[in-house]
Amino acid sequence: MILLVILLIALLTSALSFMSQEGFRAKWIAFSGSILVFILSVYITINNCECHTTFDRALAGNFGAHFSIGMDGLSNLLILLTTFLTPLIILSAFNRTYRRPHVFYGLIMMMEMALIGVFSARDGLMFYIFWELALIPIYFICGLWGSTDKIRITFKFFVYTLLGSLFMLIALISLYLATPTPHSFSFEALYAVRMSPHMETLVFAAFFVAFAIKIPIFPFHTWQPDTYTTAPYQGSMLLAGIMLKMGIYGILRFIIPLCPNALAEWGWLAVLLSVTGIIYASVIAIRQDNLKRMIAYASIAHVGLIAAGAFVLNAEGIRGATIQMISHGINVVGLFAMIEMIQVRFKTRKISELGGIAGQAPVMATFFMIMILATVALPLTNGFVGEFLLLLGIFEYMPWVAGVAGLTIVFTAVYLLWMNQRVMFGKPKLILPDFNDLTTREILILSPLVIMILWIGIYPATFLNIAEPALLGLIH
Amino acid sequence: MSTLIALSALAIITMMIGAWHKYKWIVPTLVVGMLVACGLNIADWNTNIHYYNEMMVVDNFAIAFNTILILMALLVIIIAGHYFRNVVKPLDDVYILLVFSLIGGILMTSFANLVMLFIGIETLSISMYVLAGSKKFDNLAKEASMKYFLMGSFASGFLLFGIALLYGSSGSFNLTAIGSFACSHSADLPKMFYVGMLLTFVGLIFKIAAVPFHFWVPDVYQGSPTVITAFMATVVKVAGIAAIFRLFNHCFMGLQPFWANTVMIISAATILLANLTALYQRTFKRLLAYSGIAHTGYLLMALLAINTHSMGAVLLYLTAYSLSTYAALVVLMLVKDFIYDDKMEHYQGLAKRNPFIAVTLAVSMLSLTGIPPLAGFMGKFAIFTATLESGYLGLVIVAVIGSAISLAYYLKPVISMFFREGGQIVIGLTPWLRIFLVLLCLAQLVLGLVPGLITQLL
């Protein structure tokens, strides 16, 4: 029931922001709404009981579909990630002067509602509806407040991801028709379907295309760098931090339990594509001058590793994928937030135009260093836990693939540390007379992220234990 | 039956009002009369009575489709009151023809005899030929009317020839009789029967504009007054689809192996060709014309699934499609009132000063694309499910690709309105119009959330 309330609060906050007609009021409405949602989601995590989360109501004549939400450990972690990051994302926009701010905050909260819906759906049709619903606000966020060439880029993004999702819709309908009559979309019924090998391969292919576009896995990634670069920072954070996790969540939720045989047969291809993406994106990231674009390519590389770990179909890989989803969300939001802080001050995000920030702003440089080290997967940070488990899982699957995938750590170190060196150290290239270090608001955004980085890095069991039973259930 | 009588009486009363020059009363009378007709129509639910020696049958199928027909016609008449508000000359003939056309549509949903089908189609079409050219001094309107008339006559010719051949082989005009003839002689049906079946089908898909019989649509839509376009895109299409489904359901159900491939190819070709052509349209009205053709393709998919009770899906799809197309055309009309042109460029930056119009159009476009949770998604979902259930995976994949293509052109006006900088036009809306637009959006949302309201009917 509380989960339903969370969804409704997010929806209501969104509606209130739309109607508030004024930026100042809208941002406080959105911020307090998202904080409330976060508190409630922590509450249902601690008092985990079916009574708080499960809600099931048949929709009249709706093709056997139910409005059915619930929360197992995997959903729980991702809902927490969403509700944890959204207030920070909203907070990061507080000092920006966007046109029509009430629409902006309304769309962010609508996005949060759709994302929580995706992660909590217990019914295939509900899942699909929320999945598509999440596209609309992010499309408008990128289209309305994006920078150069936004129309072409957001258009490509929307059409591309919709095409992928439609294949998923076909797969879902086929599964639905394979359930015993009266047909049902509930996850239990879908999991119980026994498919012929031919059908299983087709279902696997359809799901794979949908998720590969969303994540994105090489070679379906072409929409991603442009979209991340052109989107407003909050849009990039939503996309990279939470939305692409929908794809990995989809792999864990659908592909692994539904098509294990197809995965055993075709998994090598999926792993190969994911690993290719790691190398490909890392090499491109090294040469990027635009900070945001660099993070976009880095993101392709890191999620490639997560996807590879999810596809190898062993416990370590899946555990690693789960924890790394959370870590990547936190790290990438931290990086985007800091790049925005840099851009707000220097009016540029080109590496070649920046330099020597550390001398002027030691606090900023420290936070930036922490974010980067976490992304590079330094031990005691969250990145290490996830990537270690992922590589372990891939190693069990095929050692030489793990060897190639492990290059990601080296590559990440190369481009991120080198970038850090050029941006933070050396001679200041731009001297601003009224330059100031991080403000309280900015520290307020970054400290929760740093706390989480260290918490997951030092004691990941807190989070792994939440997801563990659900993950074991998925493999068997 | 009482519906038909009520509507005919309504048309005659409207004529009288026109004769007495009380033009202000026309729209209110029509609204009340049509609501009454709609009520009478629904009162017949579950009665299933035949009339006039089985010429007509009022079953639930007919009642459900009649309800959509009457309500859509009502919406068109309401907005016509706004559209024609500044026209000085009397317009009673336009309204009367709309009602007669609606009567034809009602005959098309409830015929039990092929003669009745023909009468229905002609009643509907002849009124529409006149209405398409009702802007007498506009060359485009003349072209539209002429083209529509010529093409429509050809179609009627095909249909009539087909009916004659069916009669010649089976010895009856009655649907049930033809159906049982086809069943009992399924092994040795005369060639004439097959030809007759194909010709009636061709005649009917002319009316609902499926490829390759769609060429008249864009020109006719463009030339006609927008209100008439709205009527054609909604009422005429619903009636045509209902007629096809009734005919196939009663007569040709057992012959599916024969016509399935034809329908499949026509459906796939319609979806692909219409969606691809729509990408290149510069005016919004032609874009909507091609969108309408594409939706015919999706609806024909359901014809293949006719034995899996796809009627509910068709009904839902038609309701969703009609509502969204109608809403889009209302927006087009409001914009055109100000700019006298419907090129897509004029929509640039419209959202900034006209949020109501922009949001209505965006909702309609997304619903037509089939984005949840809007009505169009549920319609598409229901049709895809029915088609997959009958085992046409390839066709559904084509339809899915078509849907993705369609997003590209449905987004065009949305992108123009929201993302491009543009004019400073402020389109004045009366409070009533605002409420009307909000209701249209809400209706599309509600249908998307509880499609059971409609699918459970049939």
Image (tube, coloured by chain):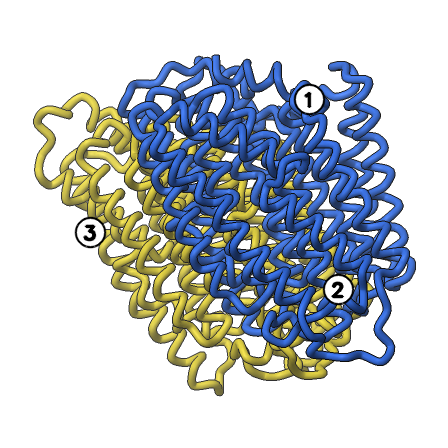
Chain colours: A blue, B yellow
Which residue is the site of mark 3? B161
Q: Between marks 2 and 1, how big is the CA–CA gap? A: 35 Å
Check disc 1 and give the amino acid type.
Ala
**Which disc is residue A358 wearing?**
2
Mark 3 vs mark 2, foreground winner is: 2
The answer to the question of whether label 2 and label 1 lie on touching residues, with beta carbons closer than 8 A, is no
Which residue is the site of mark 1? A461
Q: Position of residue A114 (x, y in %)?
A: 67, 41
Q: Residue at x 84, y 25 (%)?
A: A43
Check disc 3 and give the amino acid type.
Phe
Chain identifier of the residue bearing label 2 in the image: A
Query: Residue A37: in sight, yes or no?
Result: yes
Query: Residue A173: in sight, yes or no?
Result: no
Q: Position of residue A312 (x, y in %)?
A: 41, 27
Q: Residue at x 21, y 24 (%)?
A: B183
Left or right of residue B105, residue A447 in this image: right
Quadrant of the image occupied by residue A400: top left
Disc 3 packing (10 Å; few <14; some 14–19; many ≥20)? some
